[in-house]
Image (cartoon, grey):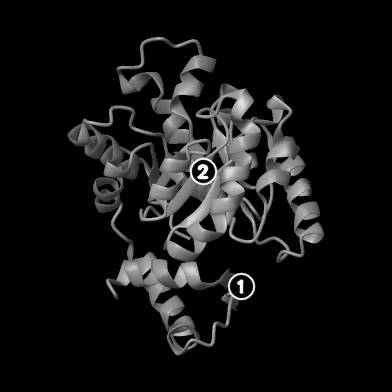
């Protein structure tokens, strides 16, 4: 799975969801949290459920859903409302410790069994947005095999720290650096925070370049125009290119032959059609 570009799509906006089917970030992440008012959560779950499989079939992107935080009391309703074939993973906002990861993974396991989905197929990206989360990033990253990456939520982190002036990166440099280091130490990827100024592409590129220098695997985004410039900053590594070659070799015959082998295991990891599309994109294969 690639983590260069994770694009948030408001889960209550049908027009944006439909448009997302023609976009190509590494991860399409439909949002049930910050962008959705409380009285629209149920409707957003329905919209996401209806469109997720279509997104997975049409796009080369992985499909994730950002649910609400453990403290919201909405986690069970969110997961029950969206988990289905077509959802690759969940983003868990404001993750503070390993107990919250365990709570979510237990619900995921129950839903996979209940809905006859492949066990362990749905992955998890905890979002680090609090002082406590920053302190516990390494243990959160190691909490469960489903955890494949962590994402930095800078603005909630600054709010938690009661820092009002965030124009200077020094106000969050330690947290940003620690998240990338802890994720790498745990053997998973890290995704940097959003760039808030949609029109400032030069600032976006500079910020993304800084994130890559700190060891981040990619960046979270709030606008489609940010996909291409960020992707170019996070060019594939030699390791990603080698892995892509292996995926294409393993899946070319069933995919191109039309036999539709579905998911197969490669070096202990499950790969399927979406990984094949991503691998071809990395290698520049049409």
Q: What element carries label 1?
A: loop
Write the residue at 48% across / 57% down.
Answer: 55
In the figure, is residue 23 to the left or right of 37?
left
Write the residue at 28% across / 57% down.
Answer: 235
State the residue in front, 274 or 94. Answer: 274
Rendered image: mark on residue 30:
2
In the figure, is residue 264 to the left or right of 233?
right
Assess disc 2: are there few (<14), some (14-19) or many (≥20) residues with their C-alpha within 10 Å of its C-alpha: many
Q: Nearer the viewer, mark 1 or mark 2?
A: 2
Q: Is mark 2 on a helix, strand or loop?
A: strand
- Residue 41 versus residue 59 in the image, above or below: above
In the figure, is residue 166 to the left or right of 190?
left
Whether residue 246 is visible, yes or no, is: yes
Residue 124 x %, y %: 61, 48
- Residue 255 versus residue 152 in the image, above or below: below
Where the C terminus falls, by quadrant? bottom left
For residue 121, which quarter of the picture? bottom right
State the residue in front, 110 or 125. Answer: 110
Whether residue 217 is visible, yes or no, is: no
Write the residue at 34% across / 21% down.
Answer: 170
State the residue in front, 222 or 99. Answer: 222
Rendered image: mark on residue 58:
none
Residue 263 x %, y %: 59, 75
In the figure, is residue 159 to the left or right of 232?
right
Q: How far apart are marks 1 and 2 (CA)?
A: 28 Å
Comes first in the chain, label 1 or label 2: 2
Residue 76 x %, y %: 75, 39
- Residue 132 versus residue 84 in the image, above or below: above
Rendered image: mark on residue 268:
1
For residue 128, which quarter of the picture? top right
State the residue in front, 240 or 115. Answer: 115
């Amino acid at each position: 799975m690639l983590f260069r570009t994770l694009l948030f799509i408001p889960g209550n906006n049908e027009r944006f969801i439909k448009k997302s089917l023609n976009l190509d970030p590494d991860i399409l992440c439909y949002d049930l949290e910050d962008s959705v008012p409380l009285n629209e959560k149920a409707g957003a779950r329905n919209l996401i459920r209806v469109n997720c499989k279509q997104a997975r079939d049409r796009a080369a992107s992985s499909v994730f859903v950002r649910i609400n935080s453990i403290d919201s009391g909405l986690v069970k309703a969110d997961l029950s409302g969206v988990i289905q074939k077509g959802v690759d993973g969940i983003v868990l906002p404001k993750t503070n410790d390993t107990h919250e990861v365990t709570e979510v993974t237990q619900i995921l396991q129950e839903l996979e069994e209940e809905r006859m989905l492949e066990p362990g197929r749905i992955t998890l990206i905890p979002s680090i947005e609090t002082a406590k989360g920053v302190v516990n990033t390494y243990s959160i990253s190691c909490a469960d095999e489903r955890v494949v990456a962590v994402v930095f939520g800078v603005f909630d982190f600054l709010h938690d720290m009661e820092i009002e002036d965030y124009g200077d990166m020094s106000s969050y440099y330690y947290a940003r650096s620690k998240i990338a280091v802890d994720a790498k130490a745990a053997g998973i990827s890290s995704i940097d925070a959003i760039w808030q100024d949609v029109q400032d592409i030069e600032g976006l590129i500079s910020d993304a370049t800084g994130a890559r220098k700190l060891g981040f695997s990619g960046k979270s985004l709030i606008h489609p125009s940010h996909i291409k410039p960020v992707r170019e900053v996070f060019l594939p590594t030699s390791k990603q290119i080698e892995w892509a070659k292996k995926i294409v070799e393993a899946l070319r015959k069933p995919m191109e032959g039309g036999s539709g082998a579905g998911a197969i295991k490669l070096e202990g990891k499950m790969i399927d059609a979406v990984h094949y599309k991503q691998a071809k994109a990395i290698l520049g294969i049409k």
